[in-house]
Image (cartoon, grey):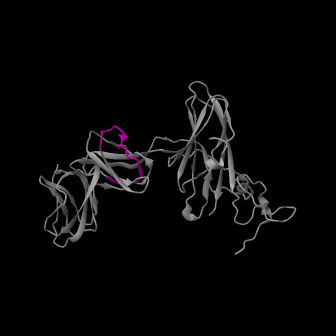
């Protein structure tokens, strides 16, 4: 199937199609955009943030191809960091410039106006992103401390449903162990595992007619009421872990264990259990997560709230020396340093004067192109 070649893609003398490569291709087709930004007297150790949100691919918007930013500094060394997934409050709206100013020569289906605006002088914490926000613990009682657990319903009709129990077992208290119990109505069913230390959460395969009780030798650990599927489990509002080590804290004194279930960089399922340290925010063990799918807080007291955070993720870092000018940040090979950004995602470009005394003027020239695929 042939497609019409617009005049802008033909040589003006011979009329033959012109094959363009590199940045000029995107400029010629009206897909490339740039935005010059001047930052005056950026104080020592101070930062200036630029924010943008990539288009969501579900509505057919283009992919964003980001190139390392050109920039210069009049006095001190300056460092730029591109953060992925970091929230920002809107600053000043900027409309990037189309690098093809001969707009009448842009063919059908060619981008003329940018889909992605940029905001300058935004506010961003660039510390951590909250994915589970102050959720009350499950208040599980009578933890087995090295024993079995038993599940039973108060309705004889509750047969064949499964109860997946998440907990820790003797000798493996930093990972989540799973045991599936098949319900048998009002007949109690023991877990196959006999060495549970702490029960962290549980979920049913289907809603039950009666109330489900899980017990240890000491008594009831928790109950699940009719029409409820889980207890002690929180689903994060964002499951993206950016291959970072998550963090946790509590609203008060607590050393209760909290479990995280997700995936590693290779998409394999991983888990991690770590004790809270009260109100102190700290790393949740040392395991990085690509995704965080479930957080288990059943063992935390009901009067304590748990917060789970993911460190803001740095995609790339660019630097320019004292009083230097960078023809392309990160080196001369701009194309080899290109990033295709995640659709529908918030980004913050943090510009920091890393000098300790002198203010500096910074000139940026942000360049990217929008590719419709």
Please report the residue visible at 20 percent of the width from the left and 67 percent of the height from the top: 183
Please report the residue visible at 72 percent of the width from the left and 57 percent of the height from the top: 30
Q: Mark yes or no: residue 293 visible.
A: no
Question: Would residue 267 appear left or right of 54 to someone viewing this image?
Answer: left
The residue at the far top in this view is 357
Image quarter for residue 17?
A: bottom right
- Seen in the picture, residue 232 relative to 127 is either above or below; the reply is below
| Image location of residue 269, percent across then percent down | 37, 56
Count of numbered circles on the image: 0
Question: Would residue 220 appear left or right of 78 to someone viewing this image?
Answer: left
Is 305 contained in the magenta span?
no
Extent of the magenta region: 275-295
- Seen in the picture, residue 108 relative to 70 is either above or below; the reply is below
Please report the residue visible at 30 percent of the width from the left and 39 percent of the height from the top: 277
Q: Quadrant of the image for the C terminus?
A: bottom right
Q: Pick the residue in front: 4 or 54.
A: 4
Image quarter for residue 224?
A: bottom left
Question: Would residue 12 appear left or right of 204 to someone viewing this image?
Answer: right
Please report the residue visible at 84 percent of the width from the left and 65 percent of the height from the top: 15
The residue at the far bottom in this view is 1
Q: Pick the residue in front: 286 or 47.
A: 286
Q: Quadrant of the image for the N terminus?
A: bottom right
Question: Would residue 213 appear left or right of 123 to someone viewing this image?
Answer: left
The residue at the far right in this view is 13
């Amino acid at each position: 199937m042939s497609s019409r070649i617009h005049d802008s893609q033909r040589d003006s003398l011979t009329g033959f199609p012109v094959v363009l490569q590199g940045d000029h291709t995107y400029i010629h087709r009206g897909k490339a955009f740039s935005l010059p930004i001047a930052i005056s007297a950026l104080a020592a150790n101070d930062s200036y943030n630029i924010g943008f949100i990539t288009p969501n691919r579900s509505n057919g918007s283009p992919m964003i191809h980001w190139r390392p930013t050109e920039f210069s500094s009049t006095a001190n060394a300056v460092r730029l960091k591109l953060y992925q997934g970091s929230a920002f409050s809107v600053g000043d709206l900027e409309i990037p410039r189309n690098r093809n100013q001969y707009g009448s020569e842009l063919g059908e289906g060619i981008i003329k106006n940018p889909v992605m605006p940029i905001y300058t002088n935004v506010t961003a914490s660039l510390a951590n992103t909250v994915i589970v926000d102050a959720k009350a613990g499950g208040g599980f009682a009578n933890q087995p401390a090295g024993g079995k657990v038993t599940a039973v319903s108060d309705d004889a009709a509750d047969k064949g449903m499964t109860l997946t129990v998440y907990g820790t077992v003797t000798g493996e208290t930093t990972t989540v162990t799973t045991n599936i119990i098949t319900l048998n109505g009002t007949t109690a069913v023991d877990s196959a595992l006999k060495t549970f230390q702490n029960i962290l959460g549980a979920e049913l395969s289907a809603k039950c007619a009666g109330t489900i009780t899980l017990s240890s030798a000491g008594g009831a650990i928790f109950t699940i009421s009719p029409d409820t599927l889980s207890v002690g489990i929180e689903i994060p509002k964002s499951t993206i872990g950016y291959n970072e080590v998550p963090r946790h804290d509590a609203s008060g004194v607590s050393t209760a264990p909290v479990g995280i279930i997700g995936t590693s960089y290779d998409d394999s399922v991983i888990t991690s259990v770590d004790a809270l340290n009260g109100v102190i925010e700290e790393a949740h063990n040392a395991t990085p997560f690509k995704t965080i799918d479930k957080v288990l807080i059943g063992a935390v007291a009901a009067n304590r709230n748990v917060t789970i955070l993911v460190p803001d993720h740095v995609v790339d870092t660019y630097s320019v020396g004292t009083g230097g000018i960078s023809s392309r940040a990160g080196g001369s090979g701009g194309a080899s340093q290109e990033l295709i950004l995640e659709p529908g995602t918030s980004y913050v470009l943090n510009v920091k004067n890393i000098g300790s005394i002198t203010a500096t003027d910074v000139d940026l020239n942000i360049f990217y192109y929008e590719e419709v695929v």
